[in-house]
Image: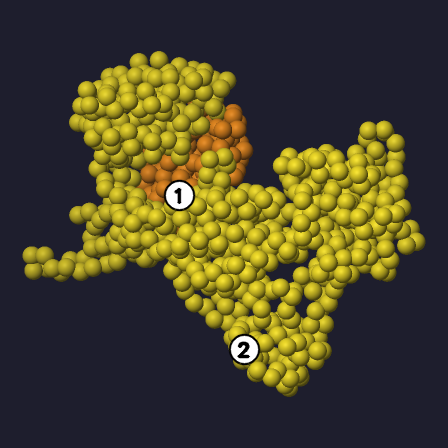
């Protein structure tokens, strides 16, 4: 019988404050197979690890159970400790008596103590069944796929490429640039957003290691870390890249006019268009939803005038597959729909606009050339009301979370407005002004003191139209007085939400999110740029609201992780894969349910008789165990997850 | 029914969703009764119907199988298979004379720590009301 040692951690008072660890140790002594049990203040500390190493050697232990925190935190630590002391790392199991015991049963010390004993015993049973396993080595494809080409995606792509690895930068829109290319100026420095982003866009397009695939979408990702197969859809652009010379003749003749996405619908574009002058790649796109000419009998004017013959109505969608070792998800954000802010006149009044629309109005490349004019009649607004938290921090009606960047961009909006309309008044309704960031508080103070922006602490109660004015009612909660502003323009700071379509995409890629759809990080503090699914990395607002410097820092972090992954000669995979035993009679029930087609049926001859059994492709098997749950004869099981092991664990848990 | 009956509930929890939710419930110090014992499985689809019936035969008062929501399975669709098996499990329990209510399949994602705590409370209360299972150890 295996000689098993148990080490029970106090974790300061985290465990010992609720669980009587001494009693746990005493109760465990004498349990079948346990030849050593002791408690220690912090088992994860270096002296704690040394204690385990020494005890393994002195008491000639065959296996250990560390009763402490969640295995997601320290399983790797203690398996390495076991290995250092000469054991196979799989001869170590962790009993989670913190997250799943002491922390959740703080009021029931006795119950928690008894439960801790049962948890430890069940893991003792588990480790008793564990076999020695050696990691499976697999090659790594040193090519990264970056999904989304806003500032976060571009930065991640550049950093990965600068480290010498190939990058495919995927963007579903006709150009890279994302949201940042739409912005006027950026806080807290007021540098022009396009001026700082376009050099990065060009750098990405010129980088020998980066291939930009715009107007492409990710259809499916299969495989595993280091060895993904990424299926991409190339949407038809109907204009040949490299042949189009941007002569503009097609735009002149195109009869279809639709709202421009780049200008947030405040300007128009043709059905054949360049989203904005600095677009990368520099090629026109024919938007098939609005074009008439895909039916050449009806139109086809653009093709007639195109001298280099770049327009091809017969282009179709293409689906193709690429191999990659890592995926960076940088799918960005949209604003919460205006239509849901009916109480603030969202989509009811033309002169109630959102923050991105105001960015376009302020932008030198925008529909008004940077002059502040309101959408309804083009007049210069003399009173502008900015409503912060228009949907954020509102758990009853809208989104409970803080969108983080609105305080700062509203200060910037108000400031830029005052710089352009010297005799205008900017009023900001706020709940709190949050300026946590380098130079942010100073920037906000500048808006208040130098630019005389009128900050009103209070929520807006009503927004309604009176003549050509938008009347905003609110209460100044500092003075207790009712406030009424007859405004010419109202700007709503809407919540940031994950960009449209990401919910479906993440579902297809099986990437978990939080309940608002922001992609999940592997650990909220310690692994902020990795997804729990190995090989997926995160950057930008897809993970949660953040400003440009944070998105860029996260992108560089993700790129650093990708670089570290690619620096390994080969990757180690968990050897807990399915194994077939002699009980298999080849019934093949397990073949179809396998999600990765790792199980196949084979026939072989024995004693002159043809027999059948299944085989598992170890390179493909993910160790999910669907096969073993399908098997009627215990003929296949995931290594170290056998039925006998589970049932012994159950027994241990049910025994007093 | 005895007042001090303490049910023993075994919960097979998927490594990717519900085990993580249970960890997060701990980090947030959500409080729930000590009756639910978690056994971590790689996927809810790993849970053979025999694990559930055997757990009952070995004296569990309740057995839970928890995994990722449909569509979110780490292994594509392991939980779809779990769902199909749950029906078979219910029929097997009928044969054994074990109340169906003692078994539950529940999807709890890594983000739903509060749901895990609530679920543990709910099942403890339900099984307390049902009383000890037929095969409970003396």
Which hue belongs to chain B? Answer: orange
Nearer the observer, B126 or A604: A604
Graded by Cα atoms within 10 Å as few (under 14), some (14 to 19) or many (20 or more), the crowding at tag 2 reads few
Percent position of residue B60, x then y: 37, 30
Nearer the observer, A618 or A480: A480
Q: Residue at x 45, y 48 (%)?
A: A559
Q: CA distance from mark 1 to mark 2?
A: 53 Å
Which hue belongs to chain A? Answer: yellow
Tell me the residue that label 1 is attached to: B44
Percent position of residue A447, x then y: 77, 40
Q: What element does badge 2 sit on?
A: loop
> Can residue A191 be spotted in the picture?
yes
Nearer the observer, A386 or A177: A177
Reply above or below: A77 against A612.
Answer: above
Q: What element does badge 1 sit on?
A: helix
Q: Residue at x 37, y 17 (%)?
A: A41
Q: Residue at x 36, y 42 (%)?
A: B42
Tell me the residue that label 2 is attached to: A243
């Amino acid at each position: 019988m295996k000689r098993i040692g148990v080490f029970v951690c106090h974790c300061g008072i985290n465990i010992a404050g609720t669980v009587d660890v001494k009693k746990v140790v005493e109760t465990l002594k004498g349990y079948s197979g346990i030849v050593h049990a002791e408690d220690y203040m912090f088992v994860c500390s270096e002296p704690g690890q040394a204690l385990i190493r020494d005890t393994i050697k002195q008491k000639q232990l065959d296996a250990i159970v560390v009763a402490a925190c969640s295995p997601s935190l320290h399983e790797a630590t203690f398996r390495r400790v076991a290995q250092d002391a000469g054991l196979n790392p799989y001869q170590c199991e962790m009993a989670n008596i913190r997250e799943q015991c002491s922390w959740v049963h703080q009021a029931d010390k006795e119950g928690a103590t008894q439960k801790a004993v049962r948890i430890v015993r069940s893991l003792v049973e588990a480790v008793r069944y564990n076999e020695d396993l050696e990691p499976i080595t697999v090659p790594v494809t040193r090519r990264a796929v970056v999904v989304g080409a806003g500032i976060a995606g571009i930065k991640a792509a550049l950093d990965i490429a600068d480290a010498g690895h190939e990058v495919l930068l995927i963007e579903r829109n006709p150009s890279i640039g994302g949201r940042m290319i739409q912005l006027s100026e950026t806080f807290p420095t007021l540098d022009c957003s396009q001026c700082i982003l376009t050099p990065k866009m060009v750098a990405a397009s010129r980088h020998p290691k980066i291939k930009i695939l715009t107007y492409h979408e990710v259809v499916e990702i299969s495989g595993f870390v280091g060895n993904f197969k990424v299926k991409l859809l190339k949407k038809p652009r109907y204009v040949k890249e490299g042949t189009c010379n941007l002569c503009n003749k097609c735009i002149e003749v195109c009869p279809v006019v639709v709202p421009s996405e780049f200008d947030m619908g405040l300007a128009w574009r043709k059905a054949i268009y360049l989203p904005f002058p600095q677009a990368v790649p520099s090629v026109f796109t024919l938007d098939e939803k609005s074009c008439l000419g895909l039916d050449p009998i009806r139109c086809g004017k653009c093709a007639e005038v195109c001298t280099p013959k770049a327009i091809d109505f017969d282009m179709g969608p293409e689906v193709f597959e690429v191999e990659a070792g890592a995926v960076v998800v940088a799918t960005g954000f949209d604003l919460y729909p205006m239509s849901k802010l009916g109480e603030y006149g969202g989509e009811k009044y033309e002169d109630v606009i959102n923050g991105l629309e105001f960015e376009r109005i302020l932008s030198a490349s925008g529909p008004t050339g940077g002059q502040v004019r309101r959408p309804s009649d083009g007049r210069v607004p003399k009173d502008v009301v900015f409503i912060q938290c228009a949907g954020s921090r509102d758990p009853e009606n809208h989104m409970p979370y803080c969108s983080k960047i609105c305080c700062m961009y509203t200060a910037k909006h108000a400031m830029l407005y005052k710089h352009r309309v010297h005799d205008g008044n900017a009023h900001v309704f706020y709940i709190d002004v949050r300026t946590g960031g380098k130079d942010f508080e100073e920037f906000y103070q500048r808006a208040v003191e130098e630019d005389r922006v009128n900050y009103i602490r209070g929520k807006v109660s009503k927004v309604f139209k009176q003549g050509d004015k938008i009347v905003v009612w609110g209460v100044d909660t500092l003075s207790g007085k009712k406030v009424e502003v007859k405004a010419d323009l109202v700007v709503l700071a809407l919540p940031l939400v994950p960009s449209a379509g990401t919910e479906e995409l993440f579902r297809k890629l099986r990437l978990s999110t939080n309940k608002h759809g922001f992609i999940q990080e592997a650990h909220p503090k310690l692994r902020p740029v990795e997804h729990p699914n190995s090989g997926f990395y995160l950057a930008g607002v897809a993970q949660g609201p953040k400003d440009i410097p944070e998105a860029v820092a996260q992108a560089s972090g993700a790129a650093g992780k990708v670089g570290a992954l690619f620096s390994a000669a080969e990757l180690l995979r968990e050897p807990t894969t399915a194994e077939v035993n002699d009980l298999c009679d080849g019934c093949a029930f397990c073949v179809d349910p396998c999600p990765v087609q790792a199980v196949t049926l084979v026939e072989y001859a024995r004693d002159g008789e043809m027999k059948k059994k299944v085989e598992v492709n170890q390179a493909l098997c993910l160790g999910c165990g669907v096969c073993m749950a399908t098997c009627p004869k215990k003929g296949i099981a995931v290594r170290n997850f056998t039925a006998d092991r589970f049932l012994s664990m159950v027994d241990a848990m049910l025994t007093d | 029914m005895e007042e001090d009956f303490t049910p023993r509930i075994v919960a097979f929890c998927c490594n990717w969703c519900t085990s993580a939710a249970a960890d997060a419930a701990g980090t947030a110090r959500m409080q729930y009764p000590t009756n639910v014992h978690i056994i971590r499985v790689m996927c809810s689809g790993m849970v053979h119907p025999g694990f559930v019936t055997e757990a009952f035969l070995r004296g569990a008062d309740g057995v839970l199988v928890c995994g990722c929501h449909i569509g979110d399975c780490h292994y594509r669709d392991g939980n779809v298979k779990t769902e199909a098996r749950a029906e078979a499990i219910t029929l097997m329990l009928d044969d054994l004379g074990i109340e169906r209510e003692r078994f539950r399949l529940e999807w709890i994602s890594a983000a739903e720590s509060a749901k895990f705590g609530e679920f543990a409370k709910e099942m403890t209360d339900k099984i307390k009301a049902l009383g000890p299972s037929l095969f409970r150890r003396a």
